[in-house]
Image: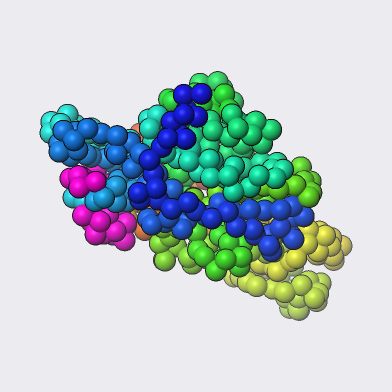
Amino acid sequence: MAYLTKILTANVYDVAIESPLEPAVKLSEKLGVQVLLKREDLQPVFSFKLRGAYNMMVQLTKEQRDQGVICSSAGNHAQGVALSAQRLGCDAVIAMPVTTPEIKWQSVKRLGATVVLVGDSYDEAQAYAKQRSLEEGRIFIPPFDNPEIIAGQGTVGMEIVRQHQGPLHAVFVPVGGGGLIAGIAAYMKRIRPEVQIIGVEPTDANAMALSLHHGTRVQLDHCGIFADGVAVKLVGEETFRLCREYVDGIVLVSRDAICAAIKDMFEEKRSILEPAGALAIAGAKAYCNYYGLKKEAVVAVTSGANMNFDRLRIVTELADVGASKEAVLAIIMAEIPGSFKRLVEEVGPVNITEFRYRYSDSRTALVLCSVGVHKEQELQALKRRLKEAGLMVIDMTSNDLVKDHLRHLIGGRAILKDELLYRFIFPERPGALRKFLDTFTPRWNISLFHYRAQGQVGANVLIGIQVPPEDEQEFKRCAVELGYEFQDECKNEAFQLMMST
């Protein structure tokens, strides 16, 4: 009841709008349910984050505001605090990692806040902000783990109840630290307890799902950054308490599914969501398809539209895969004249969208082929035709290593002793490559290197490096000390098939 009162009396509309609840006609027809979009991407800073920031800041005393506020953020929370400070006549300092894209920190600066770029990660920026808060007496504005922040975000749930008074099966909410879903759930479970509150997280940033499963907060060792708006390693203490009590479940979605949801939103409203902003749509689609939901009404909160333009290339490449309209197949066939023509004949009327081949040996040829499909039955029929023709077919559609790197590298196998394969996320800043090379070379030889930009949120880099078995532990220690996110790909079947012997 305390949160119900807080949300009902939350002061957010000096800066926020009551965002519309709009029907998604095309998506509704496709899924057979009534899909409604809660358009938080239409807020003045293109995100729901200003609701919580303003609700906390407007309740500060005059003396506290005169001392100023400070926060740490890599994006949307920073803009919410900056706009709130501007409206309240309050001095604001925003600590952001040095890896923050210029488009984001410039947006914050234009709102009148002082931007300090500090540290390589959010944790370092947060430590700086908290220390400066103590030194200068500034009020630290947390991104999610505070009752007033949660209550401000909870006004989204209050609006949904007011805007849709008919039957409602579920509300799908993106989850990072948990402030938005905690606020929505705390309100709606009091007013409309029959409505399911479903969180949505990326598969590689699933801190809330793991925490709810284990009954205690779980900190992730590694956190995917594609949906950087929800890239949180540890959810809030208060948000976890509320989610444990009120949230009905969490849906995990892939990067491909997120890209497909961004495309759905563009086709629906001609609006482009950021990856975190499209999470709820991806989760609603996955949930409705998995449970065969029909003729029910569901709400998806489109939470943000601060998209970096250069990331659109990756989105367009992966959207059709995420929507199951494109499949990536590895095909092994005899290396003889006419085999390519025979393959094309067996593929039949299916549209080939990409074809990659490089001579490897005189016996067999490996082809990486992307094909356009509209239904799962089409894909299964294609694979069956190819196998009946004596061709070996391996479905690589869900293999991120293929989509990010190997489709660009196919060119024959190599015999290399003691080769390890790792993926690193390089921060997008000058000197990142030099720091990597200083850590590993010339001690160990680099045998493969493929850089894949991800739209200023970090570069996805595939590394082959020759490390003797007795040095492997030392190599891993150096990788941890480097401070870049990394993942072991040595056992990935795609690399064994396409690049190794």
Tell me which residue sits at (58%, 61%) in the image.
Answer: 265
Q: Which residues are magenta?
A: 88-112
103 drawn magenta = yes
Foreground: 347 or 239? 239
Tell me which residue sits at (79%, 46%) in the image.
Answer: 292
Q: Residue furthest left?
A: 136
Task: Kindly tell me whether residue 348 is visible in this rendering.
Answer: yes
* Number of disc labels: 0
Q: Is residue 6 left or right of residue 57?
A: right
Residue 233 higher or lower than 498, as above or below: above
* Residue 489 pos. (x, y %): 52, 45
* Residue 476 pos. (x, y %): 39, 36
Foreground: 148 or 403? 148
* Residue 17 pos. (x, y %): 43, 53
Q: Is residue 366 left or right of residue 259?
A: right
- The image's colouring method is rainbow
Q: Residue 334's quadrant in the figure?
A: bottom right
Foreground: 279 or 145? 145
Task: Kindly tell me whether residue 467 is visible in this rendering.
Answer: no
Foreground: 197 or 14? 14
Tell me which residue sits at (59%, 42%) in the image.
Answer: 161
Q: Is residue 486 left or right of residue 173?
A: left
Tell me which residue sits at (59%, 29%) in the image.
Answer: 190
* Residue 342 pos. (x, y %): 79, 75
Residue 74 higher or lower than 455, as above or below: above
497 drawn magenta = no
Q: Residue furthest right?
A: 388
